[in-house]
Amino acid sequence: MLDLLKIFGKPKASKEVAKERLKLVLIHDRANVSPQFLEMLKSEIIKVITNYMDVDESALDIQLTRTKSDDGKSTVPALYANIPIRNIRNSGK
Amino acid sequence: MGEVIVVTSGKGGVGKTTTTANIGVGLALAGKKVVLIDTDIGLRNLDVVMGLENRIVYDLVDVVEGFCRVKQALIKDKRYDGLYLLPAAQTRDKTAVSPQQMMKLCEELREEYDYIVIDCPAGIEQGFKNAIAGADRAVVVTTPEVSAVRDADRIIGLLEANELKNPKLLVNRVRIDMVKRGDMMNIDDIIDILAIGLIGVVPDDEKIVVSTNKGEPAITDDKSPAGQAYRNIAKRIMGEAVPFLNLEDDGGLMFKLKKLFGLKAT
């Protein structure tokens, strides 16, 4: 498939690769977080959430990304979390 | 009251010293009184780039330690009226000077000179802290590479944390041919990522190597594209609005043909 793309499609300009890599690395630099930090955060979030609902831990997706600020003028780092719920426990009430 | 401008980058080898030398000569040629300070103690180079290495008697450390007066340490560049260099010490290290001492020195110099341009060492440690301590404005030099832009981003954050707001970006060593074929980030890409204002774009130019070989800053070379870019940058520093060099438009036949047929390279 990759070879086909090389033959028929225009290969991705290397500057696009540079931009993508740079944006990713800057998200981490700016927020001053390491992958270990994210793992710690992830396990803490699971701990709290499982008190209230049954979630699919293996499908949990947490990452730092960037989003437009409220005024739409700049981009700011954001914490993105996708936590699939299996079942909500109502016993807490 | 003069202004203190620090030239910094984070990453080494992107052209801080060359930029400092060229801006300094440009400002002096415009009739300003200028002092260039090399704060790269232990690894000084502004003296050789300026071609003044044989005239050093006293240095920055001698001044802050009170071993001599500032006036005694300033080397007058005989080629350009009003241009002076305060060289770094070569046999000491960055801890020989403190940010407080740099602030005091800048205050003293701005009484008498229009511009004080500080050549900052690479890195974010003591040398960087010394270099930015007395500055009013900052020029951040980068090249269109992932490593240099990443370090520039870090430096911009540190400058803003140290109350140096609105640093300006200088993109150095741009290869127009590579930008055109998409193998080098263009100015908009870099500005978009770093989100700061632009002070200049300097094309990659062999004449910089030749001028550094001779110790004569390229800004005086009418035929050097980098020299032209530095002339524009010096004007912008003095507050003039100079349009940026158009990297896409080389004015060549192919460009005109493409434009005619609406195929202008983007």
Image (cartoon, helix red, strand yellow):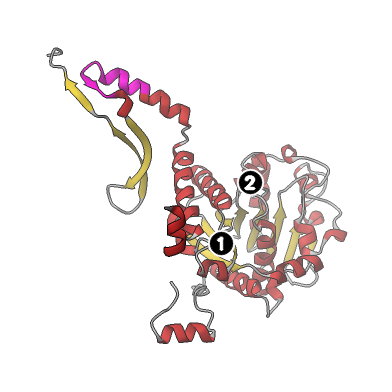
- The reply, left or right, for residue A23 in relation to residue B125 is left
Q: Nearer the viewer, residue B65 or B80?
A: B80
Magenta residues, start to end: A43-56
Q: From this viewpoint, is residue B127 visible?
A: yes
**Mark 1 and 2 residues: CB-CB less than 8 Å, in contact?**
no
Label 2 secondary element? helix
What's under tag 2, amino acid-wise?
Met
Instruction: Determine which of the numbered discs, if any, sits on residue B171 in the image.
Output: 1
Label 1 Cα crowd, 10 Å radius (few <14 / some 14-19 / many 20+) = many
Label 1 secondary element? strand
Residue located 69% across and 61% down the image: B18
Instruction: Determine which of the numbered discs, if any, sits on residue A42 in the image.
Output: none
Residue located 57% across and 49% down the image: B147
Check if residue B182 falls in the magenta segment. Answer: no
Residue located 53% across and 45% down the image: B154
- The reply, left or right, for residue B54 in relation to residue A91 is right
